[in-house]
Amino acid sequence: MKPYCLCYIILLFSLLVGAQYADDECEECVDCEECKESEECVECEECEECESEEFQPGRQDHEVHDRFSEEPNIVHDHANMEDTGSMKQKVLDMHNEFRRKLKKGGVSDLAWDKSLEELGQKMADKCEWGYLYESEVKSGGYGNIGQNIAYSRTVEQDFEKWTDQREEPRHYNQLVSPDAKVVGCGVAKCNNEGYYLVCFYRPGNNLVGNTSY
């Protein structure tokens, strides 16, 4: 056998073995977390699918709006405060438990407000990322209210975002405002992927540029 033929056969064999090895590695990359952590999994098609489908709760406002706009005004697997039973109490408890942890006094527990819940649910059901404008608040006769919004895989993750003073100062300030006395929220599952939580507070401070302590 001629030398160049032997070299060709060896090269072909090496390529086949390498491809088979890569396939074997990819078969093991069945978990998206493994795709992130394993260097061998980076090139797997399964990991590419993971990357394309990965939910990114930290995206900027305009990116969230783009996600909602894929299917505007459509709510999948509708879940509001009444449907979920204990959801209303859970959201209220998360608010009050966090407010109680503050070192400074003067921050009392919030009570639930049905009218603010209805407003929050109305906005959540639209699956459109955004805040009420001050003009809308005045024309709607809602009084002095504030608004927090978040979109994550769970309602708990939604709320957790607001507790980050550095990343979410606008939401944090409203959450800990000593002026707020009542809260009402709505929640909807949008695009079959994450929960959109919309909460309103009265008196509020983050729609008209007020500041909290």
Image: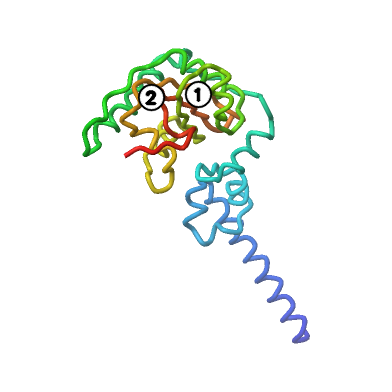
For label 1, the residue is 187
Q: Quadrant of the C terminus?
A: top left
In the rendered image, which quarter is residue 71 located in? top right
Q: Secondary structure at mark 2?
A: helix
Q: Position of residue 102 (x, y in %)?
A: 25, 37
Q: First in sequence: mark 1 or mark 2?
A: 2
Which label number is shown at residue 105? none
Q: Position of residue 150 (x, y in %)?
A: 49, 34
Left or right position of 125 against 212? right
Left or right position of 109 against 150? left
Q: Position of residue 58 (x, y in %)?
A: 50, 45
Q: Quadrant of the N terminus?
A: bottom right
Q: Nearer the viewer, residue 111 or 54?
A: 111
Q: Residue at x 57, y 42 (%)?
A: 61
**What amino acid is found at the position of numbered circle 1 in the picture?**
Val
Q: Nearer the viewer, residue 41 or 68?
A: 68
* Marks 1 and 2 in Cβ contact (< 8 Å): yes
In the rendered image, which quarter is residue 126 located in? top right
Q: Nearer the viewer, residue 133 or 87?
A: 133
Q: Secondary structure at mark 1?
A: strand
In the rendered image, which quarter is residue 101 located in? top left
Q: Please state the total of marks drawn on the protein image.
A: 2
Q: Is residue 16 above or below residue 148?
A: below
Q: Residue at x 55, y 45 (%)?
A: 60
- Direction bottom: furthest residue: 3
Q: Is residue 143 above or below residue 206?
A: above
Q: Is residue 181 above or below residue 57?
A: above
Q: Residue at x 30, y 27 (%)?
A: 96
**What amino acid is found at the position of numbered circle 2 in the picture?**
Val
For label 2, the residue is 91
Q: Residue at x 58, y 19 (%)?
A: 139
